[in-house]
Amino acid sequence: MRACLDACVLFPTVTREVLIGVARAGLYRPIWSDRILEEWARATVKLGPEAELQARGEVALLRAGFPKASVPPRDADLARLHLPDENDIHVLASAIAASADVLVTLNAKDFPKQTLAFEGVERLSPDAFLMQLWAETPEPVETVVADVHATAQKMLGEEIALRALMRRAQLPRLGKALSR
């Protein structure tokens, strides 16, 4: 399965780490464009100047780890597509160019399901996408989430309940399912 990751799901660290972790486990092939990665790096500026530098380092690691993930949008798709926010057209165009099955985004209003369906792309939130992967192959998802949880606790220097961490990462259903 190919999944195009929107910048908004790469920005939150926990969400990104879980999504990339399950990609490393081979559960799907991640897709993005250089512009999507640039949007993510620029969005971190609001966290401080060092955050952008860190994001750019992580972008370089993603490019090295997934050399075939960056798929540029085709000019013809950019010209013919229409979305409520024209600044999101490049995301859908990259998904189409890569023959992505899924577009993973938190931005539902700007990616109407009927428009994506016409292009053969399903829109899913990261929570719904990860729940689908977990339902199909639970063990690798559980392992990745446990590793991300442990790393988050270590970085915070305190215990945090898995469900609370997942809720903060906008992965509430996954957190609930894995906390049982």
Image (tube, helix red, strand yellow):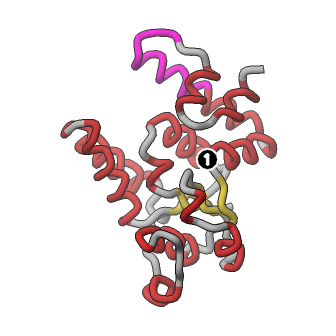
44 or 178: nearer the viewer: 44
Q: Amino acid at mark 1?
A: Pro
Instruction: Report whether 132 appears left or right of 105.
Output: right
Q: Counting other residues with Cα less than 10 Å from the Cα at mark 1, is it few (<14), some (14-19), or many (20 or more)?
A: many
Corner quadrant of residue 166 = top right
61 or 174: nearer the viewer: 174
Q: Residue at x 66, y 33 (%)?
A: 172
Q: Which residue is mark 1?
A: 126
Q: Residue at x 59, y 21 (%)?
A: 164
Q: Position of residue 140 (x, y in %)?
A: 69, 37
- The quadrant in which the C terminus is found is top right
Q: Is residue 75 above or below residue 100?
A: below
Q: Residue at x 41, y 11 (%)?
A: 157
64 or 84: nearer the viewer: 84
Q: Residue at x 56, y 24 (%)?
A: 165
Inspect the magenta stretch and tell me whether residue 103 lies in it. no
Taken as a whole, is the magenta stretch helix, strand or loop? helix
Boundaries of the magenta span: 146-159
Instruction: Report whether 172 appears left or right of 90.
Output: right
